[in-house]
Image (cartoon, rainbow, N blue to C red):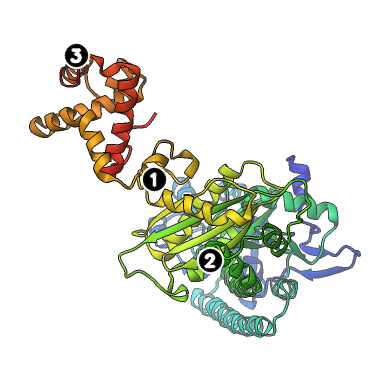
Amino acid sequence: MKREARDDLSPFCGNGSYILSNGREEYRLNKEFTFTVADVLKRPLFQHAEVTAGSRGLSRPIRWVHVLEAAESGSFLNGGELILSTGVGVGDNREKRLHYLQELIERKAAGLCIELGEYIPEIPRDLRELADHHDFPLIAFLRPVRFVDITLDLHENIVNRHIQALRDLESYSRDLQRLTLQGQSLSRILTHFQGVVHTQTFFLPMDGPPLFAPTMSQTVQNELTGLLKTSLLSATASPDSTGLLPISERKQILYQPITAMGQTLAYLGVILYEQEPDEFLFLTLDYTATAIAQILLRKMFAQERELDHQNQLLDDLLNDRLRNEEQIRMLLGIQSNASDIPLYLAVIMEVHMERPRYEEETDSPLHDLVVVFRTILTRWKFRPLVRSKGSRLYLLLIETGQMIDKRKQLKEAMTEIERVCRKALGSEAEIRFGVGRPSDRYSEANRQFQEAEQVLSCPIAGPFFEDLGIYRLLLQMNDHYALNSFIEDYLGPLLRYDEQHGSQLVLTLRIFLDQNCSKQETSERLFIRRQTLYHRLDKIRDLLGDSYMSPEHRLSLEFALRAHDWVHKTPRLFTR
């Protein structure tokens, strides 16, 4: 985006006032709670003061007043101090005075006031040039002044402004609480927020159109929306804390995420024109974000109650109480005569924690998170039916017309859900997913959930039933005696040899077959030398016989190796 275009994003005129779309000027930037160098110059004690350099920095806010005569004391500054000095010790030495001023600039002081007199009869040119270069206000007292009077006057003014700011914040907080309890709309809250900060404000939800107060022209609104979505809503961005986003040399965006139960729901922000945010703006932004979060959460729970009948429908599907396909589609709002019936995925999420199993739904650690899960899944373009039962979450995810890659989108959604769970339940929570095969037969949803159940019972497999491969057959085998005898017949000699000698012949054979019998790749995967691999393969041949690599024998070995993993629940550490 070109700088010229970006510079038009904030519809402010040059003097800092806002221009509405109808051309009427409104809402000048409020400086009441910021005490600047320019404000100081209006005080009676500064009637004989003169700005000799750095006049472009008069808008710098002052947090405190400090008397400082030596650069070595600069380490005590925190930033924002107005410095008073007589020039003693630095006035007659060019190197010292330049080092002194440079130290104040680097420590982010607000400005420097020098009393002209014995030590510095006039402000040297080198100091003026350095101050002008950094837009650092350099003020000269043309007559003697009492620093104690200045300090007392300015400190009293600063403290009074802070006290007034706290009172106004308390009043603003009460107004927000009243508007929230009255069920006022988000646009009303945003307008109230704008009336306090006196600058352009916006509300950017994760899904849905943004809101602006005051309204802007459609062109500017579209460009600003595009910039905000790229910077805040993209997968690579998505900041989770308050921050500043520059949009031109003179304009920047102050934003704050609106979060609930560990999930970012939207962003609230203001556009600043030649202005740095102060504590009052940060606190006002935070109070407003909290109020909006309460409104959004209340709306989400209200929507969840409206979906109770769909939750009951999911219960009926889980318990195989509904078998009429047309009736189910009608209840889901799917046209039975549609040429393209949307597919669905049956998903089970299971949470293992070091706590007793939850039997009642309302006691479930997932119950209060359901509303967040629904929001996440909707954002990834699924239409979700959600039900929490104990430590499990049952999901029937219906595809929408906006699906591009349902498998990839589901993985992203599961990753986000897992992150929310760990944040809410603790990092020790073990979270697993089981996903059945896609289907458009809603009356057979019970079977798809059974597939998801089988995935959960196979800890060495991934979340998708269609990826189980040969483990799908192993899951159907209830005769463990037959399975163990098969493993013994084909792997017994290797298992006993490994047990007696502490070797790794079974693992070596597994990797060798997985790597399509490539000796180089096998040795690399096992981190052993080729000669060591040759020795192991010779020993395997001695124990299993020369025919162990014949097609039928190799197929049986592959099955026996998977069956051994299955019986012993061994994770597949090495995969192709």
Which-is-in-front pick, marks 1 and 2?
1
* Nearer-the-camera pick, 396 or 481: 481
The image position of residue 569, as x and y in percent, is: 29, 45
- Determine the secondary structure under disc 1: helix
Q: What residue is shown with label 3?
A: 531
Check the image and report above or below for 70 versus 3: below
Depth check, front residue: 211 or 438? 438
The N terminus - image quarter: top right
Residue topped by disc 1: 476
Q: Which mark is residue 387?
A: 2
Between discs 1 and 2, the one toward the N terminus: 2
- Residue 117 position (above or below residue 153): above
> Which of pointers 1 and 3 indicates the residue nearer the eye?
1
- In the rendered view, would you say 447 is above or below 29? above
Residue at 30% in and 65% down: 354
Q: Is residue 540 left or right of residue 16?
A: left
In terms of sequence position, does the residue under pointer 1 or pointer 3 come before the other?
Answer: 1
Crowdedness near tag 1: few (<14), some (14–19) or many (≥20) residues, C-alpha within 10 Å:
few
x then y, percent, for residue 154? 56, 76
Q: Quadrant of the C terminus?
A: top left
Depth check, front residue: 141 or 429: 429
Q: Secondary structure at mark 2?
A: strand
